[in-house]
Image: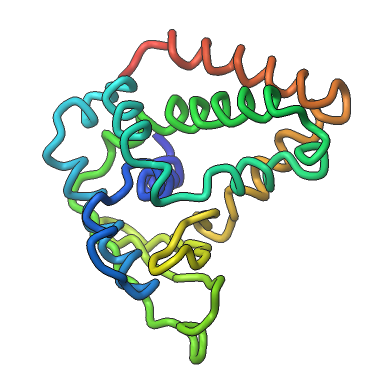
Amino acid sequence: MHRRSWISALGLSACLLGLPALGAEALGADAFVRQVSTDVIEAVKVDKAIQAGDVNRIRSLVDAKVMPHVNFQRMTASSVGPQWRAATPEQQKRMLEEFKTLMVNTYSGALTQVKDQAVVVKPLRAGSAEQSELVVRTEVRGKGDPIQLDYRLEKAGEGWKIYDVNVGGFWLVDAYKGQFAKDLSAGGLDALITRLSDKNKSLASAPKN
């Protein structure tokens, strides 16, 4: 598997796996990301089902822990673009579900590649700690060159929520927006939802390495 794929998985898993402990006390944005990253890596290392690419195991973690820690609706809406605002509640619900399933199916196998990596959180830019939205920059270090992995965060009460991830210089929302644009132009949101559903079924039935 391409190295960027498992790094993408790590970034998305930081969103997907969530952190139940974070609600206990307010953390700074950099401390939040540090704890997310550390907990994700450790969770993958000790969970044999995740290492084996068990999509059901990953999905159960998503359903239990994702929503308190990620603004997934913002991530989805930004990936869809202007058509999101015109969508019906049912279309939005279906799109949220298919998009979440797409990410779980796409990156579940990549989680098996997490071995001895560590994440180094870089210092926040001057003055950014007081902002309601900011970027926390990190590097994933292991064998080979370090990989850039950054997070866009928004203030949510006393804590933070993730709404985008930058992997090696590419923001995932922008990448998905580019992928979705063709289907949206050709057939609108229903066409995109149908394509994602078909892709999810194909990924779910593909053999796991």
Q: Is residue 52 above or below residue 172?
A: above
* Total marks placed: 0
Left-right relation of 23 to 177 = left
Extreme residue in the right direction? 186
Residue 40, x across and y down, in percent: 26, 49
Left-right relation of 101 to 74 = left
In this orientation, which residue lies closer to the viewer: 155 or 163?
155
In this orientation, which residue lies closer to the viewer: 133 or 198?
133
Residue 64, x across and y down, in percent: 31, 34
In this orientation, which residue lies closer to the viewer: 170 or 54?
54
Q: Is residue 165 above or below residue 207?
A: below
Left-right relation of 19 to 150 = left
Residue 185, x across and y down, in percent: 87, 30
Colour style of the rendered protein structure? rainbow
> Image point 54% across, 74% down: which residue?
132
Quarter containing the C terminus? top left
> Image point 85% across, 21% down: which residue?
187
Residue 6, x across and y down, in percent: 38, 42
Query: Residue 49, located in which quarter of the rendered image?
Result: top left
Extreme residue in the left direction? 46
Query: Residue 169, located in which quarter of the rendered image?
Result: bottom right
Q: Is residue 138 above or below residue 168?
A: below
